[in-house]
Amino acid sequence: MFNDGYLGSGSDLGSFVNRKRELTWLNKQATHTLYGGEVIFTNEVDENGNKYHSIEHIQDEMFITHTSYINREWNYKVIEEWQNDTYEGDDLLYKGKSAYLYVKNHLGYRLVLNECQMPKTVQQSTTQTINLKLKNVGAGNVVNQKDSYIILKNEINEYAVPISMDVRDFKSNESYDINIEIPIKENIEIGNYDVYLKIINKNDDVTTNKRTIRFANEGVWNEQIGANYIGKFVVLEKDKEIPDASEIPDAPDTPDVPEIPDAPDTPDVPDTPEVPDTPDVPDTPDIPDTPETPDVPDTPETPDVPDIPNTDKPNANTPNTEKPETQTPSTNKPSDYSTNLDKTTSNEILPQTGNTVNFAVITIFIVAILMGTYSFIKIKEK
């Protein structure tokens, strides 16, 4: 059902003729149908002096009509007012919080697990009982038929045990004490198991995570399998003696975690002094190009110089000695500067004659000229 004048006036802008009587009818009708609409901003007040759309009015009436939904896009004035107002009702969990949060969290059904009891150990091929204490703290009810399963899960195995439980019986603002019988079949492997309660749409596959009912408790929802954690037990082999419950030690209490002291304030870091500007570096003067090295003329080849025969000068009572051959480098002079000298091959001392002296002087002169020319050529080559 859709009310387009929800909380807009005493008659919801004409939706009701007799509000009190018709709310009584809605209280029964909306147990198995959905009811809601669009809230209207109004200054009209109820018999207690509260505006019809105020948190003081809706916190009671939404449970009478089992309100399941409200269009949050209309009316924005009402939504803003709820966001700014504070809930001051009897629900201690929401006392002091925003009116918007209270309304949002109580639309439709909202199941809370208050207590669960189950044995610590069970045997294969037996039937065990799990006791649950549930409350529907929401304003609405479960309308569609559901299937329910107990899921046994450990690191290796996972079993889904169907149970007989109709969650449509869990009416708004009511508490329930539920006993669930589960068969522990022989094919269930021995070991430690976490126990979950999974509620899905009728005829959906048990492995689906779509449209599963999530309890309002914190820390019980398993997103991977889409189920609510309710406890754990150990599956033992069939006919194995079960230890007395008093012999099974309870898990040790979790030690209190000491409070972490506040970190000391970080001292202010002094400002970094300004660094003076670096003076401009003068431009590097251009370096003149290195002049090209002039080509060095090739050294002309030295022509071969004819051998100059050595003259053996006889010494008294001395055997003939031969002067080693000397190769005189070319001086590029005319060829008539090279002179061949006769050899004297006598073992006797020849008398000195005028012609001999003149010949000797000429010979020495010519040799000196040749030696000077040789030295000049060597110097030039260096």
Image (cartoon, rainbow, N blue to C red):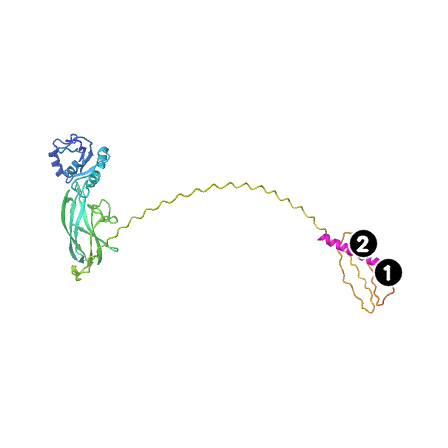
Q: Report the amino acid beneath label 1.
A: Val
Residue 270, picture quadrant: top left
Which residue lies under the disc numbered 2? 337
Mark 1 burial class by Cα count in 10 Å: few <14, some 14-19, many 20+: few
Residue at 11%, 34% in the rendered image: 20
Label 1 sits on a secondary structure element that is helix
Looking at the image, is mark 1 or mark 2 nearer the viewer? 1
Q: Is residue 368 above or below residue 101?
A: below
What predominant SS class does the magenta segment belong to?
helix
Q: Is residue 33 above or below residue 134?
A: above
Residue at 88%, 60% in the rendered image: 355
In the rendered structure, which segment of residues is drawn in magenta? 357-382
Q: Report the amino acid beneath label 2.
A: Tyr
The quarter of the picture where the N terminus appears is top left
Q: In the displayed orientation, state which residue is furthest to the bottom.
A: 317
Q: Is residue 288 left or right of residue 368?
A: left
Q: Nearer the viewer, residue 4 or 276?
A: 276
Kindly check if marks 1 and 2 are in contact, taking CB atoms under 8 A apart as contact. Answer: no
Residue 323, picture quadrant: bottom right
Give the total of numbered labels.
2
360 is within the stretch colored magenta: yes
Q: Nearer the viewer, residue 362 or 167?
A: 362
Which residue lies under the disc numbered 1? 357
